[in-house]
Image (spheres, coloured by chain):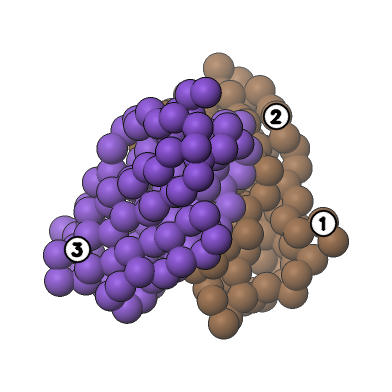
Amino acid sequence: NAGVTQTPKFRVLKTGQSMTLLCAQDMNHEYMYWYRQDPGMGLRLIHYSVGEGTTAKGEVPDGYNVSRLKKQNFLLGLESAAPSQTSVYFCASGDTSGANVLTFGAGSRLTVL
Amino acid sequence: GQNIDQPTEMTATEGAIVQINCTYQTSGFNGLFWYQQHAGEAPTFLSYNVLDGLEEKGRFSSFLSRSKGYSYLLLKELQMKDSASYLCATTDSNYQLIWGAGTKLIIKP
């Protein structure tokens, strides 16, 4: 049972480049989330999804887009990367019986130069 | 407004007891959550309180007072592997989690 898998684990981008982070979960969870974690700050919600085909904005959505075409996958896109998007990104999932009891992926460390 | 406060760092001795406090303000309370995060790893769920009082789970206990906007995580019989950051979180008006910055717990032999 893999749980939540994120790819890639590390990536270095130049300003203006685009990329996609992939999150896959095998627990049949309805809810999926993308967070960023920066030093000295709490996890901040970027976008989330409450089911296949749905997405919603979180606290810091600007500069990011998401898609949930399949229940098990949640993609996070950076349209034009900026140095302010240098961060560790975590994907998480939860089921309907305990939506905020989350299972997290291992994280993706992104550096934008 | 919405806010979560917890100490930045705490130090304790192996075998001892430590209490990590968390105060919160939110417009959409639907539970108080504690997660553990070892350095360089993902957060993992520890406990959840929705009613006032103490919830015990092995060496870890969590307390909630909704009227005071206050929670604590109590760790007993500390082990070196308990060295980690402990994240306090509660819900906003959209029932999404809002997170404190975490308390880094350092365990000394």
Left or right, B1 with respect to A50, comes to left
Measured Cα–Cα span from mark 2 to mark 3? 38 Å
Q: Is residue A98 above or below residue A22?
A: below
- In space, the residues marked 1 and 3 are separated at their CA atoms by 37 Å
Which residue position holds label 1? A2
Please tell me whether residue A9 is drawn above or below residue B47 in the rendered image: above
The amino acid marked with disc number 2 is: Phe
Q: Which chain is purple?
A: B
Label 1 crowd bin: few (<14), some (14–19), many (20+), radius 10 Å: few
Task: Say which colour chain A has.
Answer: brown
Mark 2 — residue? A10
Q: Is residue B8 visible?
A: yes
Q: Chain of mark 1?
A: A
Quadrant that contains the N terminus of chain B: bottom left
Chain containing mark 3: B
Rendered image quadrant of residue A28: bottom right
Earlier residue among tags 1 and 2: 1
Q: Position of residue A34 (x, y in %)?
A: 55, 53
Q: Circle 2: is it few (<14), some (14-19), or many (20+) Cα within 10 Å?
A: few
- Residue B52 coordinates in the image, percent (x, y): 28, 75
Q: Secondary structure at mark 1?
A: loop
Query: Marks 1 and 3: CB-CB under 8 Å?
Result: no
Judging depth in this view, the residue of A79 and B98 nearest the camera is: B98
Q: How far, Cα to Cα, is label 1 from label 2?
A: 19 Å
Q: What is the residue that sits farthest to the bottom in this orientation? A: A97
Look at label 3 and name its amino acid.
Answer: Gly
Could you tell me which secondary element the residue under label 3 belongs to? Answer: loop
Residue designated by label 3: B69
Give the label, 1 or 2, closer to the camera: 1
Which residue lies at the image location 46% right of the left edge and 48% below the top edge?
A: B76
Q: What's the residue type where badge 1 is placed?
A: Ala
